[in-house]
Image (cartoon, grey):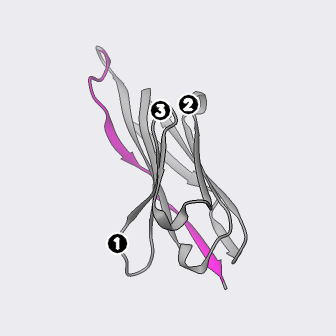
Amino acid sequence: QVQLVESGGGLVQAGGSLRLSCAASGSIFSINAMGWYRQAPGKQRELVAGITRSGSTNYVDSVKGRFTISRDNAKNTVYLEMNSLKPEDTAVYSCNAEVRSWGFQGPASSGIIYWGKGTLVTVSS
């Protein structure tokens, strides 16, 4: 079993900053891609930022230049540094990770996507 737990959400004024963390734990052999998604009330979930194991990143246009995704492979943790926050950034932020787990006969041949439960970010105007 693998668990992802997010932390760092909260209430912040427009223009402020927050740093989200997502730690993976359990029977982990390796983690490939990791990402942050968000879902605002009444809207579909969208990919905010993604990062490969080697560190290549991608961002949705609306956060480019303001958000930075990073990871610590030794800690199985992904981060999202959010600066210059806007009210439209208000959403539940969730992380996901493609995880190869340990099986009875060694590591799994392919990864499975796991999700955290999410953390609420509220940006007041």
Q: Which of the two labelled residues, at mark 1 and mark 3, occupies the earlier sequence position?
A: 1
Give the structural element (helix, strand or loop) at label 2.
helix
Specify start and end residues of the magenta stretch as a single range.
106-124
Residue receiving disc 3: 53
Name the image quarter holding the C terminus. bottom right
Residue receiving disc 2: 73
Above or below 64: residue 86: below
User: Which residue is painted at 64% across and 71% down in the image?
Assistant: 85
In the rendered structure, find residue 44 and report the number of the disc placed on it.
1
Tell me the amino acid under the disc marked 2. Asn
Q: Is residue 119 magenta?
A: yes
Question: How crowded is the residue under tag 1: few (<14 C-alpha within 10 Å), some, or many (20+)?
Answer: few
Q: In the drawing, does residue 2 fall left or right of residue 78?
A: left
User: Which residue is painted at 59% across and 80% down in the image?
Assistant: 87
Distance between the Cα atoms at labels 3 and 2?
8 Å
Q: Main secondary structure of the magenta part?
A: strand
Q: In the drawing, does residue 9 fall left or right of residue 52?
A: right
Give the structural element (helix, strand or loop) at label 3.
loop
Give the structural element (helix, strand or loop) at label 1.
loop
Q: Nearer the viewer, mark 1 or mark 3?
A: 3
Q: Which of the two labelled residues, at mark 3 and mark 2, occupies the earlier sequence position?
A: 3
Number of marks: 3
Across and down, in percent, residue 107 comes to 34, 19
Mark 1 and mark 2 residues within 8 Å of each other at the beta carbon = no
Quarter of the image for residue 78 reads top right
Mark 3 and mark 2 residues within 8 Å of each other at the beta carbon = yes
Quarter of the image for residue 60 reads bottom left
